[in-house]
């Protein structure tokens, strides 16, 4: 567990993705100092958690700031930073899964540069394919949406694709479909990066259940 309460810098690539791919960031945000300050006005938070909660800054990344960016279901959102301007030295980068037709060159450059400096890289659904397309998963164990695994193996044989809910290989956390991505982020929250009591208190409030392990593999 980190004892430094620095502001965590979190990038979210959500342009042209499904909203469900990136909802896990809201779960992670529920253990931030900002959320505790907000929720405490109606539901008192144990006081000692405030000293354990990191401030978090979320960077919502898209191609342009001049107009809203699209995300399903028919949601147009205001990004906060472009691929060119987003910090590369993030604590966490979450990559949703846009269709293969959405591959901005600036996004590929950003991913290649961010991989070198960012502490944890997460992908959900075919966001794993986007990472592979950018050329940063060579030799890594990874996964993607189960329905896209055969395509992934065919187009990127240099990656060791696994039929699992999520796969952790060093700094890379890759998940299957959107539901797998939520479970993966819950598991990351329980991995020791944050205070265990604080995490379980928050997850119980979200009805994930105290002590219930999210980690499990697909079953036929």
Image (tube, rainbow, N blue to C red):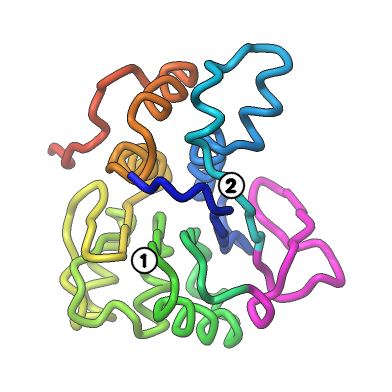
Q: Which residue is mark 2?
A: 19
Label 2 crowding class (10 Å Cα cut-off): few <14, some 14-19, many 20+? some
Label 1 crowding class (10 Å Cα cut-off): few <14, some 14-19, many 20+? many
Magenta-drawn segment: 61-86
Residue 113 lies left or right of residue 80; in this view the side is left
Residue ID at (56%, 40%)? 29
- The residue lying furthest to the right in this view is 66
Residue ID at (74%, 61%)? 79
Q: CA distance from mark 2 to mark 1?
A: 16 Å
Residue ID at (19%, 50%)? 164
Query: Is residue 108 covered in magenta?
Result: no
Q: Which residue is mark 1?
A: 128
- Asked whether the beta carbons under mark 2 and mark 1 sit within 8 Å of each other, the answer is no
Which element type, helix, strand or loop, lies under badge 1?
helix
State which quarter of the image contains the C terminus.
Answer: top left
Provide residue 20's location: percent of width, then percent of height.
52, 43
């Amino acid at each position: 567990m980190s004892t430094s309460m620095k502001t965590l810098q979190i990038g979210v690539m959500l342009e042209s993705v499904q909203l469900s791919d990136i909802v896990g960031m809201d779960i992670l945000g529920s253990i931030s100092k900002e959320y505790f300050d907000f929720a405490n006005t109606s539901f008192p938070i144990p006081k000692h958690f405030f000293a354990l909660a990191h401030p978090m800054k979320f960077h919502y990344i898209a191609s342009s700031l001049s107009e809203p960016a699209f995300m399903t279901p028919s949601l147009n959102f205001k990004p906060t930073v472009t691929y060119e301007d987003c910090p590369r030295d993030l604590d966490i980068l979450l990559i949703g899964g846009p269709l293969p037709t959405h591959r901005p060159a600036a996004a590929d450059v950003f991913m290649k540069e961010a991989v070198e400096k960012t502490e944890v890289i997460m992908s959900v659904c075919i966001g794993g394919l986007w990472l592979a397309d950018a050329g940063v998963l060579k030799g890594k164990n990874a996964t993607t949406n189960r329905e896209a695994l055969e395509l992934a193996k065919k187009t990127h044989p240099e990656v060791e694709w696994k039929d699992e809910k999520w796969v952790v290989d060093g700094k890379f956390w890759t998940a299957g479909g959107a539901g797998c991505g939520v479970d993966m982020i819950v598991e990351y929250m329980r991995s020791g990066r944050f205070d265990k009591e604080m995490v379980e208190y928050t997850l119980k409030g979200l009805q994930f259940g105290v002590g219930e392990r999210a980690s499990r593999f697909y079953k036929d």
